[in-house]
Image (cartoon, rainbow, N blue to C red):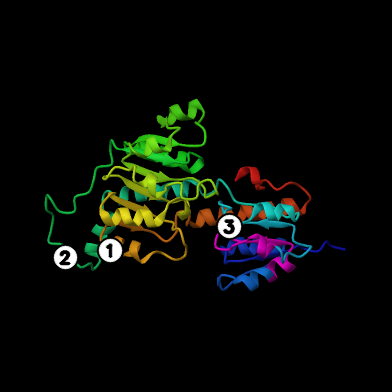
Amino acid sequence: MARRKPLVVVTRKLPDIVETRMRELFDARLNVDDVPMDAAQLAEAVRVADVLVPTVTDRIDSALLSHAGENLRLIASFSNGIDHIDVASALNRGITVTNTPAVLTEDTADLTMALILAVPRRLTEGAQVLGGGEEEWSGWSPTWMLGRRIWGKRLGIIGMGRIGQAVARRARAFGLQIHYHNRRPLPHAIEEALEATYWESLDQMLARMDIVSVNCPHTPATYHLLSARRLKLLKRDAYVVNTARGEVIDENALIRMLEAGEIAGAGLDVFEHEPAVSPKLVRLAKQGKVVLLPHMGSATLEGRIDMGEKVIVNIKTFMDGHRPPDRVLPSML
């Protein structure tokens, strides 16, 4: 008799090629309408599934896991970050957690670099002028739409993991001087290749940077890492870019500084209370003080397919009785 295929519940619509492969390998229950599951639907999913495939929009906390059925043994998250999952609670219940690391590095770094360019060079403001904005373009002028030069500026990267290093490689090509703060210094060979300066003190680094890029994960230790006090350390002509997680920055404090002109601008792809975006940020965007993007840092077709392939490998490996390659442990948080 053929072995029963595991019931795999997928919480959101994934690329067709990924879903098709899942249907071939597993008893996959798909979300073809892509409507986010509510709490009751998620509770039912963890009750019946052998494997749950959530995304960053699903809150997998201890309360939800209390509904887990005895068959749920794997949460194979379609995500790089795992701050939406209570990993410790899952492991206490004998549920393995996996994620999809290392496939979104280049895509996220590309978008980070795009924001590093877009904010000082006022790219969205310029695009709006030709796209039906309030201001009408009357032709080139020596003093119109002046931004700030990128070349020669100091970039301070917070979090020098895979994405931070990929940002540094791109930024060097644009003539930026690379500085970084990390839990520990990079190996000397990597630091030398990136011509990067390590700062043990985040406070000291922030006070000296022209542009700050947030590229660290959201953990209890990094919640509001850029607090109101730390944001005050920035120079008035400095810019902040965040493509990591909104919770790393005290968003209200950042808004107050932008409104008061205490910081030159910001480029944000993530927000503290997603999917809600502060109306104050939207107003600041219309004023040209901030560039806002709808959490699209990793949004490439290639990246999403790579993520799906990792999810499939993790499920298949686990179901074959082996340790999945992308297992998440509390020590990694």
Q: Position of residue 219 (x, y in %)?
A: 55, 49
Residue at screen point 38% across, 35% down: 204
Q: Single out the mark in the foreground, 3 or 2.
A: 3
Quadrant in which the N terminus appears: bottom right
**Tag 2: amino acid:** Glu
Q: How crowded is mark 3: few (under 14 residues within 10 Å), some or many (20 or more)?
A: some
How far apart are the two marked residues, 3 and 2, measured between alpha carbons?
A: 44 Å
Label 1: state its secondary structure: helix
Residue at screen point 38% across, 57% down: 252
Residue placed furthest toward the right: 1
Magenta range is 44-65
**Considering only vertical position in the picture, is 21 above or below 34?**
above
**Tag 1: amino acid:** Lys
How far apart are the two marked residues, 1 and 2, measured between alpha carbons?
A: 15 Å
Q: Where is residue 56 in the image (x, y as percent from the top left)?
A: 55, 59
Q: Mark 3 points at which residue?
A: 84
Q: Name the residue under label 1.
A: 286
Q: In this view, does 331 lie to the left or right of 209?
A: right
Q: Mark 2 points at which residue?
A: 136
Q: Which of marks 1 and 2 is nearer the N terminus?
A: 2
